[in-house]
Image (cartoon, rainbow, N blue to C red):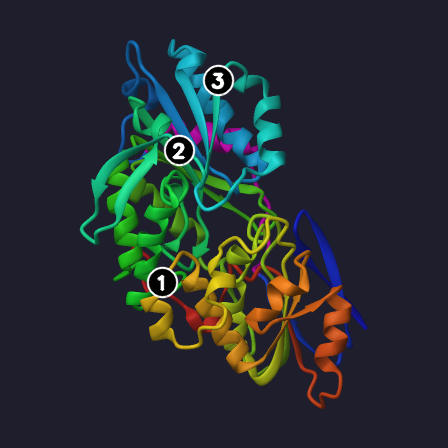
């Protein structure tokens, strides 16, 4: 028997599989950092790509806003923000003129550990700390994109003279890859903006890991231009979230470089036709609610055989994440989902595709009454779910995917990124 450990919230859980049934544990090759995170960030700031250095951006009576994506690991957020703030202070920018905005546009609250780490960091003392969530009322309206997405962003960011965005680059089901743009849209925007923006996913052939001909990506980049971004900081991490490299400068140029640095690390070799797929959203960064974690089902659904079973491990301490999982749970037709679209319908579509092909077991903190209308069964533990999944099944070939939201089966190999 083999104990296979997978991320679950801020911890790990295991599922026990008979070694003769285990096809593989499909995860990227782990790479360890070669430098301290702050050294990596400081070097990136000293060599901006396609934009001015900080000393050229700031001036007299300057206000600076730094948006950091709300799912950034606390250690990485401090490692990035500390050198930026230190340089700004050395450039005679008063601390009370610097604002850090924690960008949580699709969530109702920020992660407690991130806020605690930012407040505790000595280099960030005296800096304004603003939390942006889906409930934030202080917004600036900036017009709309060519796709008719109304763009409103956090007022503290919109009114700053110098704007910096920080985001981690990994495979993403919306824009192909996340990045500094994610710290602006959806990070700093209200639900109306996010809903109009993400509805575009249903209108085109949008795939994780592919940015060419991706209209969601094009809409996001246009939104960033409306909001403004004088410097982007793109972060590349390993599967444990440890910082491997960083790129500072113009958003699109640094994004392309970060995707190149990411290489094939988001791809996984996995054999299709498994009887059972055990998949984790990837831990707290992805499983804070079911809306976020459900994207782990995309790859798993491709790899499980028809009539098989998928076990999704996702803690979901913030609940379902969207009302759509309740209001439209009974809708089966894609055309009807598109007609009645509300934020989350695109993720509900992923869940519906999975339940149509196989049995789904969810291991989470969510109660049964919330999940069962989706056609999903609830299990108390990973081993409980696995036992129920293989019970009475002759074929027990099992595939384990520890980072389902941020990895792509190699069969989904994307074309040139940018």
Please state if 260 lies on the left or on the right of 296 as rendered. left
Disc with the residue nearer the chain's start (1 vs 2): 2
Q: Position of residue 329 (x, y in %)?
A: 50, 68
How crowded pointer 2 is (Cα within 10 Å; few <14, some 14-19, many 20+) is rated as few
Q: Position of residue 413 (x, y in %)?
A: 41, 68
Magenta highlight range: 28-48
Q: Position of residue 408 (x, y in %)?
A: 48, 65
- What residue sits right under mark 1 in the picture? 341
Q: Is residue 1 something one can see in this rendering?
A: yes
Disc with the residue nearer the chain's start (2 vs 3): 3
Query: How far is the residue under mark 1 from the one under mark 3?
Result: 40 Å
Q: Quadrant of the N terminus?
A: bottom right
Task: Say if the magenta span includes residue 47.
Answer: yes
Q: Nearer the viewer, residue 162 or 357?
A: 357
Q: Nearer the viewer, residue 39 or 168?
A: 168
Query: How far is the residue under mark 1 from the one under mark 2?
Result: 24 Å
- What residue sits right under mark 2 in the picture? 137
Q: How many marks?
A: 3
- What residue sits right under mark 3 in the picture? 127
Q: Are marks 2 and 3 in contact (CB under 8 Å)?
A: no
The residue under the point 75% across, 83% down is 391
């Amino acid at each position: 028997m083999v104990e296979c450990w997978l991320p679950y919230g801020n911890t790990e859980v295991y599922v026990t599989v008979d070694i003769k049934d285990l096809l593989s544990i499909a995860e990227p090759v782990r790479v360890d950092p070669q430098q301290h995170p702050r050294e990596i960030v400081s070097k990136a700031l000293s060599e901006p790509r396609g934009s001015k250095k900080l000393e050229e951006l700031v001036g007299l009576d300057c206000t600076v806003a730094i948006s950091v994506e709300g799912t950034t690991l606390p250690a990485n957020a401090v490692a990035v923000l500390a050198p930026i703030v230190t340089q700004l202070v050395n450039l005679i920018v008063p601390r009370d003129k610097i604002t850090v905005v924690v960008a949580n546009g699709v969530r109702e609250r920020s992660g407690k550990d991130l806020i605690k780490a930012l407040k505790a960091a000595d280099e960030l003392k005296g800096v304004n700390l603003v939390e942006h969530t889906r409930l934030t009322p202080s917004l600036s309206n900036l017009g709309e994109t060519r796709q008719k997405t109304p763009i409103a962003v956090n007022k503290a960011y919109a009114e700053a003279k110098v704007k910096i965005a920080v985001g981690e680059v990994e495979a993403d089901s919306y824009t192909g890859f996340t990045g500094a743009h994610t710290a602006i849209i959806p990070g700093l925007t209200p639900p109306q903006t996010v809903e109009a923006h993400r509805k575009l996913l249903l209108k085109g052939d949008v795939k994780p890991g592919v940015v060419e001909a991706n209209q969601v990506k094009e809409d996001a980049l246009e939104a960033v231009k409306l909001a403004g971004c004088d410097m982007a900081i793109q972060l590349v991490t390993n599967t444990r979230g440890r910082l491997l490299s960083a790129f500072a400068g113009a958003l699109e140029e640094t994004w392309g470089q970060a995707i190149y640095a990411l290489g094939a690390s988001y791809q996984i070799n996995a054999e299709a036709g498994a009887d059972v797929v055990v998949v984790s959203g990837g831990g707290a960064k992805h499983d804070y609610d079911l809306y976020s974690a459900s994207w782990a089902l995309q790859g798993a659904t491709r790899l499980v055989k028809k009539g098989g079973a998928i076990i999704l491990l996702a803690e979901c301490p913030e609940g379902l994440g969207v009302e759509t999982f309740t209001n439209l749970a009974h809708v089966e037709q894609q055309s009807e989902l598109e007609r009645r679209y509300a934020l989350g319908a695109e993720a509900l579509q992923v869940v519906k595709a999975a339940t149509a092909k196989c049995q789904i077991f969810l291991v989470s903190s969510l109660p049964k009454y919330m999940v069962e209308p989706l056609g999903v069964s609830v299990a108390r533990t990973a081993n409980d779910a696995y036992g129920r999944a293989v019970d009475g099944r002759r074929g027990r070939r099992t595939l384990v995917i520890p980072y389902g939201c941020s990895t792509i089966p190699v069969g989904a190999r994307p074309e040139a990124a940018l």
